[in-house]
Image (cartoon, rainbow, N blue to C red):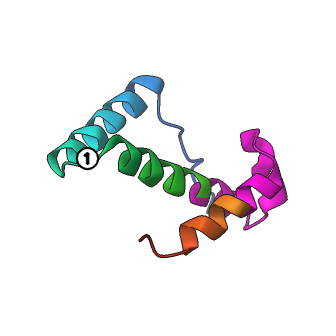
Amino acid sequence: MATEPVRSPSLAEMAQALNVLFQGMLDRSLSLEEAVWTFEVRYVEAAVQRCGGSIQRAAALQVHRNRLRVKLKRFAQPSS
């Protein structure tokens, strides 16, 4: 049995999903700094996961792998 390929969302669908996300962040009164940090954490984690845990391959985000390591280390630390 063949599996169906995963369809990538359209730009319009991504914009709609981001709008829902932004409204949720605003509803929770997140500061811009908290919102950016939250987005960045999830984006970097998703990229590394998509690349099978390889930070070097995730560097396709056009961020140097050492910078990704620093970000992942910072994300792993509890916020003060």
Main SS category, magenta section:
helix
**Residue 59 is a magenta residue:** yes
Q: Quadrant of residue 69?
A: bottom right
Which quadrant of the figure contains the C terminus? Answer: bottom left
Residue lying at 35% horizontally and 41% vertically, measured from the top left:
32
* Residue for badge 1: 25
* Residue extent of the magenta highlight: 45-69
Residue 35 lies left or right of residue 53; in this view the side is: left
User: In x, y percent, where is residue 73?
Assistant: 65, 69
Rendered position, 54 above or below 11:
below
User: In x, y percent, where is residue 44?
Assistant: 61, 54
Residue 13: in sight, yes or no? yes
Residue 53 lies left or right of residue 15; in this view the side is: right
Name the one closer to the observer, 40 or 12: 40
Residue 8 lies left or right of residue 26; in this view the side is: right
Rendered position, 74 above or below 50:
below
